[in-house]
Amino acid sequence: MNVGYQKKTRCDSLDRESDALWLNMVASALEFERLATKHKDAVYRQMVRVCRSHDDAEDVLIEALLNAYQHIDRLEDPAKFRAWLAMIGRRICSKIRQREALHSIVSLSQVAEPVSSLDLDAQNLHFRLVDIINEMPPILSEVYELREIEGLSGAETADKLGITVEAMKARLVRARAFIRKEVEDKFVLI
């Protein structure tokens, strides 16, 4: 008789599998928390500029983090977490602005005082430019945001993205050309 021997059952192997899955989920959650903590401040600053409001930026960041956590399986490269999170945030901010624009159109019909058409044009232009940046391929938008929106130097931008300065410059030229083409195609310039 084997005193130390226990017969392995199907339940034992299921327990080990569920334990492994649970440990994997905990590790994934901890990794997400590490990435979120590392990048949330920079993404928040971007959202303040894009949303033009601290309150909206906070709401957008929270919603972007929730969306990112729910769809973490779509992130192909953890090194690009910040750009991915910022892209999610920009899309959320764009949706908020579209809702606000619709609301302001309804509100404008009820306003007694005329609103300056220049104010509306500037606001509309800002929203359209943000939409163009959102349509840009991520490889270009992340360079454009870091360099043009956050104001990082070329070397800092290249370092953050893990690419050479020459590659960063090439991507920035392509990003600017993309924006220029979209502006020419979509806007009627007087």
Image (cartoon, helix red, strand yellow):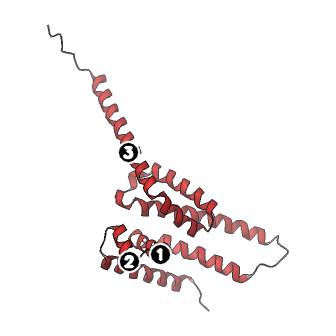
Image coordinates for residue 1, horizontal then vertical, percent: 14, 7
**Amino acid type, residue under disc 3 in the picture:** Ser
Q: Nearer the viewer, residue 156 or 20?
A: 156
- Judge by depth and name the residue closer to the eye, 52 or 128: 52
Compute the Cα span from label 1 to label 3: 32 Å
> What residue is shown at x 29% (from left), y 74% (from top)?
164
Residue placed under numbered mark 2 in the picture: 154
Which residue is more in the foreground, 139 or 143? 143
Residue at the (44%, 82%) spot, across then down: 176
Disc number at residue 28? 3
Q: Nearer the viewer, mark 2 or mark 3?
A: 2
Q: Is residue 14 left or right of residue 48?
A: left
Circle 1 — which element? Answer: loop
- Please provide percent x and percent y for residue 127: 59, 73
- Residue 170 in the image: above or below residue 73: below
Which mark is drawn over residue 121?
A: none
Q: Residue furthest top?
A: 1
Q: Crowdedness of circle 1 by 10 Å Cα count: few (<14), some, many (20+)?
A: few
Give yes or no for contact between labels 1 and 2 (Cβ–Cβ under 8 Å): no
The answer to whether mark 1 and mark 3 are in CB contact below 8 A is no
- Identify residue for label 1: 151
Q: Earlier in the sequence, mark 1 or mark 3?
A: 3
- Whole-number angstrom distance, CA of label 1 to CA of label 2: 9 Å
